[in-house]
Image (cartoon, grey):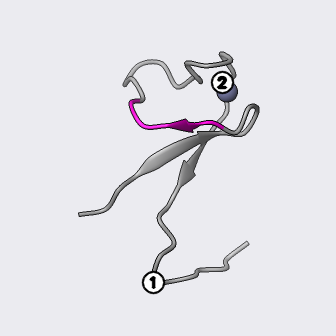
């Protein structure tokens, strides 16, 4: 199983419970959320 988490790019807090219809940070209300992948075994550098 993969722990998919989200990170607010504004305040940098980790968002674990993201609602379906609202993609905004519950802490600061920012609407840009980045996906955070667990980089334990692999490092993928595609950027
Ligand atoms: Zn935030």
Q: Residue at x 76, y 32 (%)?
A: 10
Residue bounds of the magenta highlight: 13-17
Check if residue 16 falls in the magenta segment: yes
Q: CA distance from mark 2 to mark 1?
A: 30 Å
Residue 24, image x and y in percent?
58, 22
Q: Which residue is mark 2?
A: 31
Check if residue 25 falls in the magenta segment: no
Q: Residue at x 65, y 16 (%)?
A: 29
Mark 1 Cβ and ligand 1 under 8 Å apart: no
- SS for dot 1: loop
Q: Residues within 10 Å of mark 1 (few under 14, many from 20)?
A: few
Q: Residues within 10 Å of mark 2 (few under 14, many from 20)?
A: some
Residue 43, image x and y in percent?
57, 82
Residue 36, image x and y in percent?
54, 54
Residue 24 in the figure: left or right of residue 18: right
Residue 47, image x and y in percent?
73, 72
Choose mark 2 or mark 1, whichever is in front: 1
Q: Nearer the viewer, residue 21 or 4?
A: 4
Q: Answer with the quadrant where ligand 1 appears in the image.
A: top right
Look at the numbered discs 2 and 1 and tell me whether their residues touch, using CB distance below 8 Å: no
| Image quadrant occupied by the N terminus | bottom left
Q: Nearer the viewer, residue 34 or 38?
A: 38
Residue 14 in the figure: left or right of residue 2: right
Q: Which residue is mark 1?
A: 41
Q: Main secondary structure of the magenta part?
A: loop
When the figure is inspected, residue 36 is found, relative to residue 24, above or below; the finding is below
Residue 41 location, quadrant? bottom left
When the figure is inspected, residue 27 is found, relative to residue 14, above or below; the finding is above
Work out whether mark 2 precedes mark 1 in sequence or the reverse, and give the earlier one.
2
Q: Residue at x 47, y 76 (%)?
A: 40
């Amino acid at each position: 199983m993969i722990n998919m988490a989200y990170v607010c790019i504004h305040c940098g807090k980790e968002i674990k419970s993201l609602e379906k219809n609202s993609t905004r940070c519950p802490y600061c209300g920012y609407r840009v959320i980045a996906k955070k992948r667990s980089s334990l075994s692999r490092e993928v550098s595609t950027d």
